[in-house]
Image (cartoon, helix red, strand yellow):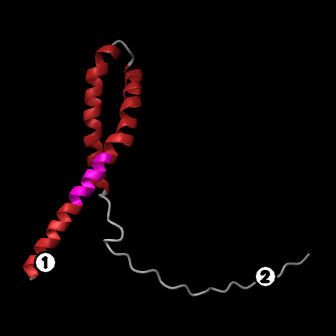
Amino acid sequence: MTTEATPIIAESEPAPAPATESARPQGPSVHMRALITWLAIFPLVSIGMLLLGPFMEPWHPVLRALVLTAFVVPTAVYLVVPRMLAGHGHLSRKIAARSALRTARKSA
């Protein structure tokens, strides 16, 4: 059984259109995401420690951390952080629109 090699012919495809900022908005930087995540987790941990602390006081510290993070992490990941990121996006778009309006007024 013999196989013949078929030549690979590169077809020229049209170049993709250049991406514009309005086509795909930039997300927050890694530093801003870290800050938003911290701003979500710190209050959740504080509230969790206040509410569960007296109940879990006799427990081993590792078990306390396990139970606390079992509540805090899903709450932050699925509820709080997405809402904070959406709020950040809304504020960023609002600031960008105001900046563009000021620039347009100055150039007119």
In the rendered image, the residue lying farthest to the top is: 58
Real-space Cα distance between discs 1 and 2?
60 Å
Which mark identifies residue 5? 2
Residue 44 position, x and y percent, is 29, 33
Callout 1, which amino acid? Ala
- Residue drawn at x 40%, y 25% is 67
Query: Quick check: 100 left or right of 48?
Result: left
- Check if residue 84 falls in the magenta segment: yes
Q: Percent x, y for residue 36?
A: 27, 47
Q: Position of residue 77 (x, y in %)?
A: 38, 42
Q: Which span is picked out in magenta? A: 83-92
The residue beneath circle 1 is 104
Mark 1, residues whose alpha carbon is within 10 Å: few (<14), some, or many (≥20)?
few
**In-image side of 21 versus 70 (left or right):** left
Image height of 53 relative to 9, above or below:
above
Quarter residue 66 falls in: top left
Above or below: residue 35 compared with residue 94: above
Above or below residue 101? Residue 70 is above
